Amino acid sequence: MHHDARIYDLETTGFVADLPYWSALLDQYNPTKVLDLACGTGRITLPLAQQGVRDQGAFQIVGLDVSQPLLARAREKVAQASSAVQAAVSFVEADMRSFCLGEQFDLILLGFNSLAYVYDLEDQLACLGAVRRHLAPGGRFAIDLLVPHLGFLEEAQVGGPVRLEVDVRSPEPGIRRFLRTATERYDVITQRDDTLYFYEIYHEDGRHERFTDDLAWHMYFPRELELLLRMAGLRVVERFGSYARAPFGHRSAQYLWVMEAMAPHECPHHR
Ligand SMILES: C[S@@+](CC[C@H](N)C(=O)[O-])C[C@H]1O[C@@H](n2cnc3c(N)ncnc32)[C@H](O)[C@@H]1O
């Protein structure tokens, strides 16, 4: 899962739909210290760094990820940026279920469904607890997470159909076409969706690469997510259901929720 930086960047080629949403959060909250959890190859980190450096002199952003290869790619990208951006960005190799950075942040973001890669209750609470401890007073925690779709899960319960998800032509020099198809199997007890991906890469020189990869997703239902956040001492303060900031509602496909830390006496574990 997500350990090949080249494949990760190929499969997210051209995906920028979420960037205006994160940019608007920066405008709204004017953070000077940001933590991009599960930052991968810096797809979100870098544009936010550019915006923060442009709008606020003292802006700092830390990208945290568990994957060394993805972080190496992120560092390569930052090395191409301006010296001001380079000075504003740092990366940490750590697990979002147990990180301890010794500093706090005005905004912590966990984008592109990345909370779905934390599967067990204890790990989910540990991750959210670590987030809360890293929030500066008045800080915000923002997530972008898939809302389970019942029709999709019903199909996946018996082994879903094979879907073409990515088909890009000339994503980078030397590659003529990149394709990704996927099929899923959903377990109603664990709420875990195991996806099997099939990749095909057609190179300009005639080579044809084909391989598979597996990735599991935890499906968070709305009340479950709310309870986990509360248990971790986080209160939801804004609920959007789309990158265009539509209010969260019955047809929303995403949780674009923003949280703040509860005061210690309000936290469930202090009661
Ligand atoms: C869908 S990618 C998102 C990357 C990036 N935020 C983006 O929007 O392109 C999910 C990321 O979560 C990271 N990840 C998965 N489990 C993790 C963990 N336990 N701790 C930290 N990062 C993790 C993966 O390495 C991967 O980079």
Image (cartoon, rainbow, N blue to C red):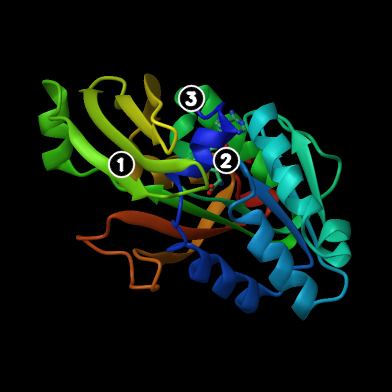
Q: Is residue 256 visible?
A: yes
**The label number, if any, that marks residue 221 in the structure image:** 1
Lower sequence index among marks 3 and 2: 3
> Ligand 1 near label 3 (Cβ, under 8 Å)?
yes
Mark 3 residue element: loop
Q: Is the residue under label 1 in contact with that under label 2 (CB below 8 Å)?
A: no
Q: Amino acid at mark 1?
A: Phe
Residue at figure coordinates x 50%, y 41% from the top left: 174
> Ligand 1 near label 1 (Cβ, under 8 Å)?
no
Q: Is the residue under label 2 in contact with that under label 3 (CB below 8 Å)?
A: no
Residue at figure coordinates x 82%, y 65% from the top left: 82
- Which is closer to the viewer, label 2 or label 1? 1
Q: Amino acid at mark 2?
A: Ala
Lower sequence index among marks 2 and 1: 1
Lower sequence index among marks 3 and 1: 3
Residue at figure coordinates x 55%, y 75% from the top left: 24
Q: In the picture shown, does residue 97 fall above or below 49? A: above
Could you classify mark 2 by the number of other residues whose Cα lies within 10 Å: few (under 14), some (14-19), or many (20 or more)?
many
> Can you give x and y, in whole percent of width and height, for residue 246 in the image?
33, 73
Query: Is 148 on the left-hand or right-hand side of 37?
Result: left
Mark 1 residue element: loop
Q: Is the residue under label 1 in contact with that under label 3 (CB below 8 Å)?
A: no
Q: CA distance from mark 3 to mark 1?
A: 23 Å
Is residue 46 or residue 206 the one in the foreground?
206
Dividing the image into four quarters, tell me where ligand 1 lies: top right
Q: Amino acid at mark 3?
A: Met
Mark 2 residue element: loop
Is residue 216 or residue 210 the one in the foreground?
210
Could you classify mark 1 by the number of other residues whose Cα lies within 10 Å: few (under 14), some (14-19), or many (20 or more)?
few
Circle 2 residue: 232
Is residue 137 or residue 62 the one in the foreground?
62
Circle 3 residue: 1
